[in-house]
Every structure is written in structure tokens, then in C-alpha cells.
Amino acid sequence: MNSRTGKRIVTILAMTLIAVAITQTSLTAGSKAAVKASKPKANAEMLAVRTTIQQHLDGITEGNAKKLEAVWDAHAQVRFIGKDKWGKDMVQVAPAKQLIKKWTAKPSPKNQGVIMSVDVVNNTMASAKVSLTWNGTKLIDYLTLMKTNGQWRIVGKAFVAADTKAKSAFRYGAPD
């Protein structure tokens, strides 16, 4: 290889590196712009989900069935650990409609809920972890929400007592 060929190779390599750097910079800038453009929509959806969850918590703590009915899907179900006829633990399922009556029967200023985390997926589905104190029992709820026709609705809930020795979590979920 003569010096002239060596210089050409170095020049080609340098130009290639510059082109790669420019491409990466523009891709990164484009990605950042796309992220910035999607953030307002994501923030609006997160706020809408949190508002729906807060209305659920307010409905329970205030004993307000109308607030709860407004945020629960008509076909939503709630899952919890109950006892079978032999006293063994089993997952039980109840319609949310049925449990709303139970949740609102004993409003108390001591009933309190806190949204611990929220995750929104594709602005159409969300999940949330909620800590709820209901009639003296601390519960952990996992809520699943879906957005249909522009509205977020709770479509499912699973909960357990935060204290594994608590027996009253079953009362919270078991239909009368």
C-alpha cells in the first residue's frame, strides 16, 4: 500500500465516522423530540387514571356508591382470598356491583386510601397499587383499568390484607 492509498483510506474512514456521528445525533434528537411530543398525552392519561382511582378511593371512604359506580365497569370482578367450606384458603371472585354495596355500607373518616403506583400502557390500559384502610384493616389493592369510549374504568381488582394475620379482609370482599 502506498502513501496515497493510505491517505484515501484514512479520509474515507474519517468521513464514515463523521456520517455515523451525524446520523446518531439526528436520530437521538428525533427520539427526544418524539418523547417530548408524547409526554403531554402521557401526562394527561396518567392524570385521568389517577383521578379515576382517587374517585374509587373517595367513594369507599365517603360511602358514596354513585362515585364508585361511575368508575367501575359494569362487568368488573374482584378477586380475594376467602375460605372454602372446609376452611381452606381459596381465590374467590365477586362482581364489583355486589361489593359496592358492602364497601359503602359503613363510611368512616378512618377509611383512607393512598395511590402507591400507577402504570399506563398505550394510553388504553393501566394498573395501580393502592393501600387502603377500611374499617380498621389495611389492605393492598391491585386495580386494572381500561379506557373505552374516552373513559377510564376499573375492570378488575385483586386485594389482600397487608397484615397476614388479619381476618377482616374477607369481610371487605365477601358478598353478603
Image: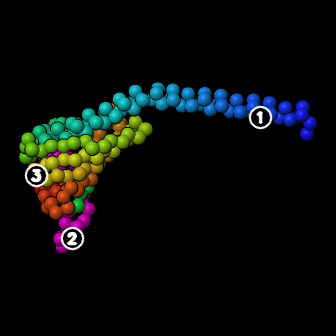
Marks 3 and 1 sit apart, C-alpha to C-alpha, by 71 Å
Dot 2 corresponds to which residue?
88
Q: Nearer the viewer, residue 133 or 17?
A: 17
Dot 1 corresponds to which residue?
13
Q: Quadrant of residue 119?
A: top left
Q: Nearer the viewer, residue 44 or 125?
A: 44
Q: Nearer the viewer, mark 3 or mark 1?
A: 1
Marks 3 and 2 sit apart, C-alpha to C-alpha, by 24 Å
- Find residue 124 and name its label: none
Q: Quadrant of residue 79?
A: bottom left
Residue 146 as seen in the image, left or right of residue 139:
right
Q: Position of residue 34 (x, y in %)?
A: 51, 29
Q: Amino acid at mark 1?
A: Leu
Residue 95 at least partly seen? no
Residue 83 lies within the magenta run? yes
Find the magenta span and give its range: 82-103
